[in-house]
């Protein structure tokens, strides 16, 4: 009994620490590097257009082109098959993975 009484007394003695208010969430600002307009090369311009676009828009337009022309591999959806226009952009490869897409695009923009 004496142990129980001391435990209860110890619990009462522990002070509750007031929780700090969580800092208000600040809306994320887009990275300016992604928003910079880049000029596509002649081969990439056949797919996305010739006017300067941010990198994010270039990737988006390439994906629109891939989906419109059904160039995504049916068995392995991570792979992109090249048609005549994309083969030039893919540096002569018939197929690349979607993870290589950003790397390939970076060699075709200024």
Image (cartoon, rainbow, N blue to C red):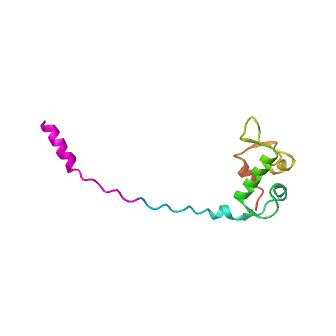
Residue extending furthest toward the right: 84
Query: Which residue corresponds to the image point at 77% horizontal and 63% vertical from the top-left?
Result: 39
Residue farthest to the left?
2
Residue situated in front as seen by the camera: 34 or 9: 9
Residue at x 19%, y 46% (from the top left corner): 10
Is residue 18 rendered magenta in the image?
A: yes
Q: Is residue 106 left or right of residue 69?
A: left
- Say which quarter of the image contains residue 50: bottom right
Q: Is residue 66 magenta?
A: no
> Residue at (72%, 39%) from the top-left corner?
77
In this view, the residue in front, 107 or 27, is 27
Quadrant of residue 32 in the image? bottom right
Residue 14: percent from the left, percent from the top? 23, 50
The answer to whether residue 67 is visible is yes
Q: Is residue 106 visible?
A: no
Question: In the rendering, at what x and y percent does residue 86 appear?
Answer: 82, 49
Residue 100 vertical placement versus 19 (above, below): above
Which residue shows up at 85% across the image and 45% down it? 83
Q: Position of residue 46 (x, y in %)?
A: 85, 56
From the viewer's perspective, is residue 43 above or below residue 10? Answer: below
Q: What is the number of callouts on the image?
A: 0
Report the span colored magenta: 1-21
Horizontal and vertical percent for residue 44?
A: 81, 56
Q: Quadrant of the C terminus?
A: bottom right
Q: Quadrant of the N terminus?
A: top left
Is 20 left, or right, of 57 in this rendering?
Answer: left
């Amino acid at each position: 009994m004496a142990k129980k009484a001391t435990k209860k007394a110890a619990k009462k003695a522990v002070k509750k620490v007031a929780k700090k208010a969580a800092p208000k969430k600040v809306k994320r600002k887009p990275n300016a590097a992604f928003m910079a307009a880049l000029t596509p090369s002649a081969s990439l311009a056949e797919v996305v257009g010739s006017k300067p676009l941010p990198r994010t828009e270039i990737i988006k337009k390439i994906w629109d082109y891939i989906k419109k022309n059904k160039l995504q591999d049916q068995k392995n959806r991570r792979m992109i098959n090249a048609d005549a226009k994309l083969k030039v952009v893919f540096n002569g490869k018939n197929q690349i993975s979607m993870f290589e897409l950003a790397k390939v695009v970076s060699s075709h923009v200024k």
